[in-house]
Image: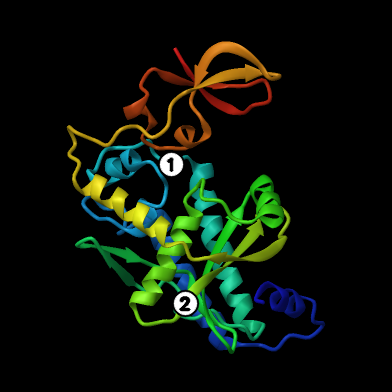
Amino acid sequence: MITDKIKEYLELNKKEYNQEVIDSSYLKFKQSVIKQFMKNYEARPGNIYTTLVTKPCARQSSYTFHGFEGEPLSARVSLNFFNGDLIELTTLMLAELAGVPIESNNEYLYVNMDKESVVCKPDGIFFNGKEYFNVEIKKMSDYAYDRFESQGLTDEWGYESQASMEVEAWRQNKKDVSKTIFIAIKGLTGNICERIVEYKPELVKQLFNRVQLVRGSTKESLPDRYYKPEMETYYKKPTGREKLGIFCSYCQYKKHCWPNFKLEFTKTGTPIYIKQ
């Protein structure tokens, strides 16, 4: 629907100059530089926003909400987040040049439920001439992209919850939206594809349950840890050592939850956190 048109545009021999698209893309680039490297206003203590609570671990969200100090982002991670923004910006730009514009990028919307109000900033909305679609754009690793392309979207990292929350936001703002066009780009190769993701109101309800857990917590009384350590294996054989799973390993607050786990590297150079 969108990605096919982008591919067609990219394969054209001649492309027209469009100053308006260039100017709007520059503004989005400027906003991304400020957010990623200078000041992220969303992640301030006491603020609840959609991507804070899309993942299942309310304890992680509570650390941010209460202003706990997390590990500083490494240069690699900072650049990776920025690259994700650049891929989103590029996709929005190409969609407009290809004649399938994605409107209302990062528009501030609010979802109200259970006496809570949560801000939501979708990547955009798309009208195909018959119906409106929420749009979400993500850069993915090779593994995640291949699985998405063959099996569709899962909610391990909160992407389904985010998509459903954005649909709910459009609905509460009087847009008749029931589905998301989820666009994935493979970071290393530039492969691009899209899948239609259905709206799941139960995920929105679960998200607001997490909001209440976070809002009702204190620095001294945080929600329970959602994940537990795993047993390390080597060639599918247990080593007898405990390690943190992938979700805790990527969390900037892991030292608050698991102070006895220290960073080591496998023989292939993969970072791993092992109980000491």
- In this view of the protein, which residue sits in the foreground, 198 or 258? 198
User: Which one is in front, 37 or 276?
Assistant: 276
Q: Position of residue 196 (x, y in %)?
A: 60, 67
Q: Is residue 149 left or right of residue 44?
A: right
Q: Residue furthest front?
A: 202
Tell me whether the residue at label 2 lies in contact with that at label 1, contact meaning CB atoms closer than 8 angstroms. no
Nearer the observer, 124 or 188? 124
Instruction: Give the image location of residue 218, x and y in percent.
Output: 17, 39
Q: Residue at x 59, y 55 (%)?
A: 153
In terms of image quadrants, where is residue 89?
bottom right
Q: Quadrant of residue 181?
A: bottom right
Which quarter of the figure is the C terminus placed in?
Answer: top left
Which residue was labeled with disc 2?
Answer: 177
Residue 5 x, y percent position in the rendering = 71, 79
Looking at the image, is mark 2 or mark 1 earlier in the sequence? 1
Question: Dot 2: within a 10 Å radius of its alpha carbon, few (fewer than 14), some, or many (20 or more) residues?
Answer: many
Q: Which residue is mark 1?
A: 73
Q: Secondary structure at mark 1?
A: loop
Most distant residue in the top direction: 240
> How are the residues colored?
rainbow
Q: Up-down: is 161 above or below 122?
A: above
Instruction: State the CA–CA distance, disc 2 to disc 1.
Output: 36 Å
Secondary structure type for disc 2? strand
Residue 143 versus residue 202 in the image, above or below: above
Instruction: Check the image and report above or below for 65 versus 272.
Output: below
The label on residue 36 is: none
Report the label total. Answer: 2
Kind of residue at badge 1: Leu
- Amino acid type, label 2: Val
Q: Residue at x 60, y 11 (%)?
A: 239
Badge 1: few (under 14), some or many (20 or more) residues near its Cα, within 10 Å?
A: few
